[in-house]
Amino acid sequence: MNELTIIQKIAVWALPVIFAITLHEVAHGWVASKFGDQTAKMLGRLTLNPIKHIDPIGTIVVPLALLFLGGFIFGWAKAVPVDTRNFKNPSRDMAWVAIAGPASNLIMAIIWAVIAKVGMVLQASSPDIGLFLIYSGLAGISINLILLVLNLIPIPPLDGSRVLSAFLPKKLSWQYNQLAPYGFFIILGLMFLGLLTPLLMGPYSMFKDMIFTIVGL
């Protein structure tokens, strides 16, 4: 996408980023509601309206900054509130709630791959529309797979930590989750040390190859 102007890049990336980030959170809230916690529903967070989920920094500033700087793009929305006291089995149910976010990103990555495929078909008859769909589809695959593999890293409070926590003894799980306030700084540290990208690229490439094979890209 290096041949695109910055305005074209924003047009291509806007919808994929917004959907990837907001639907990730909606998926958490929706699964939580199925396990008995209606907190997100009562607060109006089980909606596809991005305004309800946008975090000014994580949804707008960070993705735009990364778009200008180059490299992979990611971001975050306002976390959907979950009250585990409403679950019958808090540890197990929270693991399902956590995995729902990355699972939604995998589904969206496949959908965006289909959109890119449609763009390839349309490119001969409608070059502008076809090319836009291809670029948007590839952007959608990228942002969703980055969010998928990033959130599976078992660093609290990322989703992967919630899954791992379900398999730990209660005391060890509690101690492990005390890292949550420092998780963001750990991620930043890995990024500045140049360790985050190598950590993400292996799983990212695996999922990307799988989706390209399924859709035929």
Image (spheres, grey):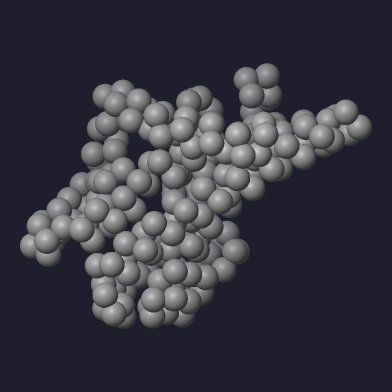
Residue 208 in the image, given as x and y percentages of width and height: 53, 34
Give the residue displayed 34% in from the left and 53% down from the top. 159
Residue closest to the far top: 3
Residue 66 visible in the current orientation = no
Residue closest to the far left: 171
Classify 97 as above or below 121: below
Residue 116 in the image, given as x and y percentages of width and height: 70, 37
Residue 86 visible in the current orientation = yes
* Depth order, front residue of 210/159: 210
Classify 167 as above or below 206: below
Q: Is residue 156 left or right of residue 136?
A: left
Give the residue displayed 8% in from the left and 62% down from the top. 171
Residue 33 in the image, given as x and y percentages of width and height: 44, 76
Please identify the quadrant where the N terminus is shown.
top right
Residue 75 in the image, given as x and y percentages of width and height: 45, 44
Q: Quadrant of residue 170?
A: bottom left
* Depth order, front residue of 12/174: 174
Give the residue displayed 44% in from the left and 45% down from the top. 148
Q: Is residue 71 left or right of residue 124?
A: left
Residue closest to the far right: 125
Give the tally of numbered discs. 0
Q: Quadrant of residue 91?
A: bottom left
* Depth order, front residue of 205/26: 205
Give the residue displayed 32% in from the left and 69% down from the top. 93
